[in-house]
Structures are given as C-alpha cells and as structure tokens.
C-alpha cells in the first residue's frame, strides 16, 4: 500500500514537468494555430541556461530559484525573437509549412547549443535546501519532487487566474475560440500572438530549467520531450490548459505503475494511451471539435487539371534525365541517384495523401518502414529472394495503412496528424523492442539485391523503373474519378457527403494506396542499404518526407520529386562538408519557408509574378 | 563492384575512410575518439608514415543514422577510393557497415561498437573489432560480482540490444560461477527516457542484495541522483558496466557514486610507461585529458599502421590476412586480433568508484586482459557461424 502511494507521488512529480512543457505548447497552438516543433528546443535551452546560471548564482536556495526563473525569462525573450522574426512572416502559410519552419529552428538550436555548451552532458548540482529526501510511509521521497508538484499546481493556478481575471487572458481565450472575431473587434493580433508565444516559450524554458536538479542537460532533450509533449497536448485537447494537466497526470501515473507491471513496453504505452483516447474522444479529453474542422478554409488550392503540353514535356524530360544521368556520373552518384528515386516515391506517396486527400500525416514513415521491414523480414525469416521480397513490400505497407488508416480517417486536422504519429511510433517501438522478431535495434542485415541486380547501375535502373511507374500510377489516380472524388472530400467533406460520397471510405482507400506506394519505396530502400533498422519507422523519417514535399511545393505533382532531389543532394553534400550541417540545413529550410512558401515549384510563378 | 586495388606512387597517402556519429547526442563520446585518432595519425606521419606513405583519414559524420552510415561507406569506397574503412560507435551502425564491408570486400576496422554480434552471430571475413565487447566487459564484472556475498540480484538496463545482451551475459557468467544467486527484479527503461523515480522505487520494491546497472549517459545521471536520494544504494552493492569511463563518470561530478564495481578507464592513475607517454602527448596536443574513446581512436590507427606494415601493401586480401593474429603494442599493453573471431584482446580496467576532491575516480583497479574474458574456442566457433 505504502509503495502505491509513494509511486503515485513519484508519478505526480513527472507529471509536473510534463505539464509545464505541454501547457506552453497548448497555449501557443490555441492562439496561433502553429504546431511548434521547436518547443522542445526552447525546453532544452531552458535547461542549459539554468545550468549556466546556477553555476554562477546557484549556491543558495534563493539564488538557485532566481537562476531557474532567469532562464525561463531568457527563453521567453528568445521566444519573442523567434515569433517576431520568423513566425510572424508565416502565419498565412499552410500549417505544414509552419511546422517545417519550426523544425528548421530545431536544427539550428541543436547546433548552436552544441557550439555554446559543448557536446558533454551538463549535470547541475541539486537545489540547495531541497537536496534531501523526506520519509513518507517508510519510503524516501526527494524533497525536490514535492517542490516540483507544488510548482505545477502554482503554475496551473496562476494560468487559471491569468485566463479568468485579466484582460490579456480573456483575449487569449477569445483568440483560441475564434480568431477572426477577435481581429474584427479591433484587437491588435500581432501583439496578442507575440505575447502568447512568449508565455508559451517561457513556460517551456521553466519546464527545462526545473529539470536540471533531476537530470543532466543534454542535446537529446529537445526531440525526447517534444513527442511526449505532443501526446499530452493531444490527449488533453489542443488549447486546453486543464486538459494538459489531466493528460500529464494520466500519462505519468500510467508510466510510473507501468514500469512495475510491464517494464519492457513503456515506450508503447504512452502512444497506446493516445491512440485509445483519440479513437474514443477524437478531440482529446478537454478539446473542442472546432479545431478539427477548418478544412474549407485550409485549402485554397486552385483546381489542378491534367497538365498541358508544357507539363508533359516536363515529365518526359524528367524521365529522360533519370534514364540518362547514370551514364554521365560516377559510381557513388549512382548510389545517390538510387536513393533519390526511392525517396521521390516516398515523398510522392506522402504528397498524394497531403495534397490529394488533404489528410495531414506525421507518421508516413510507418508505411515506408513497414515496406522495408516486410522485405527485410521476408529475407531474414523466409530466406526469400529479392523479387518476391520486394513484392511483399507494398503488401506490408498497405496492410499497415489498412489497419492504422481505419482509425485515423475518423479524425481530421491536427488530431489525425497526431494519431498517425502515434501509430508510427508504436510501430517503431515494436521494431525497436521486439528483438526476437525484428532483430531490435541491431536490425536486419544481409538484405542485398540478388546477383543479377547487384551492380549499382542495374539496381538503379530497376529502382528507377519501378518507382517511376508507381509515381505515374499515383499521378494517374489523382486524375481518375477516385482522385476527383477524393479531392472533393478534401475541399468540402460536408458537401461531398451530401452528394452521397462515402468520405471515410475514400480517405481510407487513399491511405491504403499511399501506404502501398510508400511500402514499395521502403522495400527498395532496404535493398539499397542492405539492412533495415528501426530508424526507418522513426518520426525523423516522417519529417524528412514532409521536408521533401514542402520543399518541392505542395501544389504540384512535380513538387515531391524536386523536393527529394534537392533534399537528398543538400543533405549528402552538407554532411560531407561541414560538421555544422544541421545549422545550415535548418537555416536553409527557414529561408525557403519565408521566401518560397509555395516550395521550389512556386519559384517559377514567383519569377513570372503570376498567381502562385 | 570490385574495389580497385590502388596503384599508388610512393608519396600518395594511404587513405582510411572513417565514419562516426560526430553530431547529435553522441558527440561527447565521439569527439575524444576523434582526437585520439588524429593524434595517432600525426605521430605516425611525423615519423614518415607507413610503407613510406603518409596516412590520410577521410572522415564522415553519419548523424547516428545507419542508413547514412551505409551511404557514406559507399561514398568513401566508390568516390574517395579509400583503402579501408574504420570507425562507428553505435552497435547497429557498426553492424550495418560491417555487412557493407563484407559485401563490397573492403576491410573494416570496427573501433567502438560493443555488440557481440559484430564478431560472433553476424561476424564476417572483412570485419575486425577493437574494443572489448559487451560480453567481455560483463564477464569481467560477473567475476567480481561472484566474490560478493549477495544472492538476490536486480538488473536495470536500457531496453535495446546492448542492454539485453549485457544483462544476459552477466546472468550467464554469474550463475555459472555462483549457482546460488537468483535474479529478483528487472527494469528495462527505454533508452534515454528513464523515468528515474519510478524505476528506482520499483527496483527497491524487489528488495535485492545487489544491483547490476547498464544505464549510461543521461539515464545514468538521473538514476544515480534519484537512487541516492531514495536510498536505493544504501547497504547494497552495485555493479555497473562502463561507469568507470570518464565519459560516464565525469558528468556526474560531485555525485559520482562511491564503491560501485565498474569497468572503465582510470586515465590519471595508470602507472605504466606506454600509457604515460600517450597521456603526455594527448594532454599536450589537446589541452585536455583523454577519455576511453580517445584510447580507442588512438589504438584504431595504431592497429591500421601495424596491419599495413605486416601486409606490406594496401591490397584488401593482404590486409585482411595481416589483421589475423596481428599483434601490436598499445597504451594498454600488447593486444592481439584473434584469427578465430576477429576480436582484439584489448581489455578494460576493473575497479571501484570513489570520490577524490569532489570528483569520481576509479580506485583499487586492475587491468583485465580481454583475452581472459572470452568464451573457450569451441563455444566461439558455435557462436560464429562458418560462412
């Protein structure tokens, strides 16, 4: 019994830190509708700054506390810089572009932090005055844990007062409910957005700073926390402060007791909670469904028709370049070209969902990865050859999409995106921890092409031919009756349903089709690399895919292909040339989003000064 | 594609392709390693190189992604035309590059990855590994653990291949030496996501006499602080893998645990002439002290130089043949690359942690020669399937 009480207190302390980071994310999203990937970076900066400040003034309880608050304030200030210099320019861009821009910030902060503080973990001393433990029912409980719980309640109470009792808080709530109305009433939105972002950033900084008596500041803090924070926000309901609190407590307590009952699957647990919540209550525990149904305003895309002469010339040109390129370049370039062909198909399948169906997914790596694992496991367990193993890849991708899609298409907007992410992370966790079947993180080795295709040139032409054919098939699907119906469900789900279209089923079919195509890409990826590792399923693979699609431009079918070419080339060359490649890649992404919100394809229309 | 044999003039450098995770969370491990190999390259080139040719290292950052590591292996071999490849830290990246090496018939000196699979279950003709493996280091600790009175053991290890193999090796060797021990609790936190308070409570709940720890880096710091606060280590012995390496011990600063039995690298207390001269050269060159990774990086290049002298050429067949039973002197003493499984006999230091001047150090340590902690040859033959 005493163990249960103490474990519950321990869980509450973890909930406190999770709440502080998640609530800031939730406020920022509520007001600005920006899914801020860089929120975890602000959290990390809070921890590093607090480490430095405590080294200077942290000898006493008051000094340590001042150092933590100072770190939060500085991060709030950095938030102001980020909002006014970057986000303010892209509020009108599609939400995925905003996500991309904040991801650029993640990369930049990662390298800048390494330059300032170095690569070593930075472990701060315990907080003076709270460096011991108290006895609760015969168990030692750290004093700092109790302090952290108190801080979380104080912040919850403070936010409640702020949002109920101050004009600023009322405006923030009003903006969360209805942005246009607030603007129409003459409120200076720019100021409001900046203030909300600064508040969110300061809370992230505070969350990070408060971590340093418990854990070392390290460069992996940003991505480690951001996915968990997303889960908390989504489970609680985007924009809801109480929701963030309840969800943080729920998840932390589940984890605290989970390690006792089934210590091996804690990774899966948190995503399982999210999946179950979203299936039962699609807008989160305390969320409002309005957030999820902005589709009519979100897609001002011009109608895309099958291209004219110029368009056809472009596609045939692309095909010719792809066929001829290996003849003019070196051995290694052929390897890179193969990767480009594969990633172009991956990006095209993602684009099909994003653009064709208006279905926002953060978890497209799941189908790519399942394709790779389908082929890899076929080689590993069944000793199949390359050709039959490759045939299994689209089946594996489609099967995953069939299962995950069934749940995901019942949601929309950011909730759908988060559920796709949850499923991808569950697949990743399974691949990572189910060592007996998948080889765990040691992966599957020896997935090399058959003898007849082992020459890089032969393998390139094989990959190119299949990937080009599937891309052509996807393009064909967009202009088929199915594709037009799908686009109708994207532009107005309600109107489509009114004329008798089964919206859910069309979206589900789109998932399966895109899943199969991504699976093909994954299968080839496995044979190109000779191995399959859980990384193919990880969120970073999904983000890479999004970067490619958005880099190329969402509104054109050629976009994902251009994006794959440019992204792969840049990444390959940058990592070769400089250790600061993340910094440069991040800056490049930010610059592209600000200058070219319609992607590389938008470049031509920008030059012509025509409509985008 | 067949790797082209070099047709090089006397002055052309011997090119070594090197891949490691220099950015991201592993940089604190890999940067000292890079210093180590840079020092060795500079020393060897100052003496005129090898076979009359200077060494040149072409280094690439894989960003901790196995797919990128394979891509750069392709680049190094096909575009940069390196004579051999070396490096890698994470086990799965090491395995991916090893598989690439076997397929492309390139020599690969796997310097840092710990996975037993690299030389055993997935061992291949072209891959040789320098660092003492998970099994070897776990066996060193199990030998010490067997001397303790403790009967009830609990384990805590990150839930991935390294953690699982370490726990399995420790259990196997310990129960072999002490059939009376039992394992009463296991914790498998996700890597770098240790929920420290909950895990510590759960371990205490199992009421073990002793604990075997495999967590490292940020997980270790959390585990140590939380365990000390909650009294987990009071009256309990802790045996901990790699925790004596400066990379792991130093970030803990004043909170470094005392009395833990660990494997590691007591760089400032090794009283040995070969190590002393390495230490002086390293400190002078980088104005810093070496970490365990620095020794590994340094020994990697020493290995390659000794191998080239023995092979007399950069022909891959000759180099692979030279690696087998290659003997060389290192700052840790003489080591041999076993022909049996391509594992080097480089060892590690086993001792106890203590605090001196508010910093964690290793005391009462001894050098455990890697050769003494490998299974017998018949077992190894079973573990390493013949091709």
Image: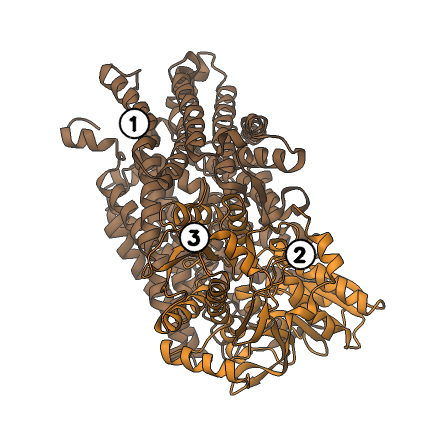
Both marks 1 and 3 on one chain: no
Chain to which mark 1 belongs: A
Chain that the image shows in orange: B
In front: mark 3 or mark 2?
3
Chain to which mark 2 belongs: B
Label disc, if present, on residue A384 of the rendered structure: none
Q: CA distance from mark 3 to mark 2?
A: 25 Å
**Dot 1 lies on which element?**
helix
Chain that the image shows in brown: A
Q: Quadrant of the N terminus of chain A?
A: bottom right
Q: Which residue is rendered at x = 41% and y = 75% of the image?
A: A54
Seen from the viewer's position, the closer of residues B159 and A49 is B159
Residue A196 in view in this figure: no
Seen from the viewer's position, the closer of residues A129 and B10 is B10
Could you tell which of marks 3 and 2 lies nearer the N-terminus? Answer: 3
Q: Residue tagged by mark 2? A: B164
Q: Position of residue A155 (x, y in %)?
A: 46, 61
Q: Position of residue B363 (x, y in %)?
A: 61, 84
Q: Residue tagged by mark 3? A: B62
B269 is higher (above) or lower (below) than A116 = below
**Dot 3 lies on which element?**
loop
The quadrant holding residue B355 is bottom right
Q: Position of residue A46 (x, y in %)?
A: 40, 64
Q: Position of residue B148 (x, y in %)?
A: 77, 77
Residue A295 in view in this figure: yes
A612 is higher (above) or lower (below) than B355 = above
Seen from the viewer's position, the closer of residues B120 and A106 is B120
Q: Residue tagged by mark 1? A: A321
Query: Could you classify mark 3 by the number of other residues whose Cα lies within 10 Å: few (under 14), some (14-19), or many (20 or more)?
Result: many
């Amino acid at each position: 019994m005493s163990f249960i009480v103490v474990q519950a207190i321990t869980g509450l302390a973890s909930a406190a830190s999770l709440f502080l980071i998640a609530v800031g994310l939730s406020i920022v999203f509520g007001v600005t509708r920006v899914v801020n990937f860089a929120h975890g970076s602000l959290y990390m900066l809070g921890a590093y700054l607090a480490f430095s400040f405590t080294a200077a003034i942290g000898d006493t309880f008051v000094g340590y506390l001042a150092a933590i608050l100072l770190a939060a304030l500085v991060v709030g200030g950095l938030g102001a810089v980020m909002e006014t210099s970057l986000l303010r320019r892209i509020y009108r861009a599609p939400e995925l572009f905003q996500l991309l821009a904040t991801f650029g910030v993640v990369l930049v902060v990662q390298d800048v932090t390494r330059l300032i503080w170095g690569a070593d973990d930075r472990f701060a001393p315990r907080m003076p005055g709270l460096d011991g433990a108290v006895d609760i029912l015969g168990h030692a409980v750290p004093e700092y844990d109790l302090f952290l719980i108190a801080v979380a309640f104080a912040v919850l109470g403070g936010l409640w007062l702020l949002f109920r009792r101050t004009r600023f808080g009322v405006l923030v709530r009003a903006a969360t409910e209805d942005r246009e109305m607030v603007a129409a009433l003459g409120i200076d939105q720019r100021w409001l957005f900046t203030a909300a972002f600064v508040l969110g950033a300061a809370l992230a900084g505070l969350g990070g700073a408060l971590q340093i008596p418990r854990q070392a500041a390290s460069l992996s803090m940003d991505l480690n926390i951001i996915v968990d924070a997303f889960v908390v926000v989504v489970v609680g309901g985007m924009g809801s402060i109480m929701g963030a609190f309840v969800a943080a407590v729920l998840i932390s307590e589940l984890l605290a007791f989970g390690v006792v009952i089934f210590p091996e699957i804690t990774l899966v647990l948190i995503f399982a909670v999210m999946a179950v919540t979203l299936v039962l209550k699609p807008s989160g525990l305390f969320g409002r469904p309005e957030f999820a149904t902005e589709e009519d305003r979100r897609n001002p895309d011009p109608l895309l028709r099958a291209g004219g002469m110029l368009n056809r010339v472009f596609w045939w040109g692309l095909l010719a370049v792809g066929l001829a390129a290996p003849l003019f370049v070196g051995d290694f370039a052929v390897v890179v070209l193969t990767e480009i062909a594969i990633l172009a198909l991956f990006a095209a399948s993602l684009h099909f969902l994003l653009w064709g169906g208006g279905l926002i997914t953060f978890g497209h790596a799941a189908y790519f990865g399942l394709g790779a694992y389908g082929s890899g496991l076929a080689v590993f367990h069944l000793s199949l050859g390359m050709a039959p193993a490759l045939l299994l890849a689209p089946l594996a991708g489609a099967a995953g999409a069939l299962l995950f899609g069934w749940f995901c298409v019942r949601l929309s907007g950011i909730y759908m995106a988060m559920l796709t992410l949850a499923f991808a992370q569950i697949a990743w966790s399974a691949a990572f921890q189910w060592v007996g079947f998948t080889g765990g993180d040691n992966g599957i080795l020896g997935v090399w092409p058959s003898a007849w295709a082992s020459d890089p040139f032969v393998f390139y032409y094989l990959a190119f031919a299949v990937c080009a054919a599937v891309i052509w098939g996807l393009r064909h699907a967009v202009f088929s009756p199915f594709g037009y119906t799908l686009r109708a469900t994207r532009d107005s789900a309600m109107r489509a349903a009114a004329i008798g279209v089964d919206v859910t089923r069309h979206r589900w079919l789109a998932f399966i089709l895109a899943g199969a195509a991504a699976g093909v890409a994954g299968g080839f990826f496995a044979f190109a690399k000779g191995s399959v590792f859980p990384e193919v399923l990880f969120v970073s693979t999904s983000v890479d895919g999004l970067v490619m699609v958005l880099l190329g431009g969402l509104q054109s079918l050629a976009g994902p292909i251009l994006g794959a070419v440019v992204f792969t080339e840049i990444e390959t060359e940058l990592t070769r040339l400089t250790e600061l490649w993340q910094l440069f890649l991040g800056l490049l992404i930010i610059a592209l989003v600000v200058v070219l919100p319609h992607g590389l394809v938008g470049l031509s229309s920008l030059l012509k000064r025509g409509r985008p | 594609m067949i790797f082209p044999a070099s047709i090089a003039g006397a002055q052309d450098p011997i090119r070594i392709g090197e891949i490691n995770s220099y950015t991201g969370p592993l940089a604190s491990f890999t940067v000292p390693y890079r210093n180590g190999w840079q020092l060795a390259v500079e020393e060897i080139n100052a003496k005129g190189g090898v076979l009359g040719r200077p060494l040149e290292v072409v280094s690439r950052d894989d960003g901790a992604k196995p797919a990128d590591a394979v891509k750069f292996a392709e680049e190094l071999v096909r575009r940069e035309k390196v004579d051999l490849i070396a490096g890698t830290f994470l086990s799965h990246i090491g395995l991916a590059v090893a598989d690439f090496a076997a397929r492309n018939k390139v020599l690969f000196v796997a310097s840092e990855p710990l996975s037993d699979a690299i030389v055993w279950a997935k061992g291949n003709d072209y891959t040789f590994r320098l660092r003492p493996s998970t099994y070897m280091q776990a066996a060193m600790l199990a030998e010490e653990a067997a001397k303790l009175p403790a009967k009830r053991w609990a384990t805590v290890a990150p839930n991935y291949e390294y953690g699982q193999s370490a726990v399995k090796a420790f259990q196997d060797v310990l129960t072999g030496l002490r059939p009376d021990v039992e394992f009463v609790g296991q914790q498998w936190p996700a890597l770098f996501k240790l929920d420290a308070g909950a895990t510590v409570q759960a371990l205490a709940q199992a009421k073990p006499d002793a604990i075997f720890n495999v967590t490292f880096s940020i997980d270790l710091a959390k585990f140590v602080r939380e365990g000390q606060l909650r009294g987990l280590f009071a009256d309990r012995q802790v045996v901990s893998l790699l925790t004596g390496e400066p990379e792991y011990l130093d970030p803990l600063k004043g909170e470094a645990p005392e009395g833990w039995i660990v494997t590691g690298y007591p760089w400032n207390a090794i009283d040995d002439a070969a190590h002393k001269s390495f230490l002086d050269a390293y400190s002078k060159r980088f104005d810093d002290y070496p970490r365990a990774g620095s020794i590994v990086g340094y020994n990697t290049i020493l290995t390659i130089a000794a191998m080239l002298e023995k092979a007399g050429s950069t022909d891959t067949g000759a180099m692979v043949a030279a690696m087998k039973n290659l003997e060389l002197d290192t700052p840790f003493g003489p080591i041999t690359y076993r022909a049996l499984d391509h594992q080097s006999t480089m060892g590690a230091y086993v001792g106890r942690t203590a605090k001196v001047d508010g910093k964690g150090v290793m005391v009462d340590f001894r050098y455990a020669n890697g050769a003494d902690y490998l299974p017998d040859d018949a077992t190894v033959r079973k573990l390493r399937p013949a091709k």
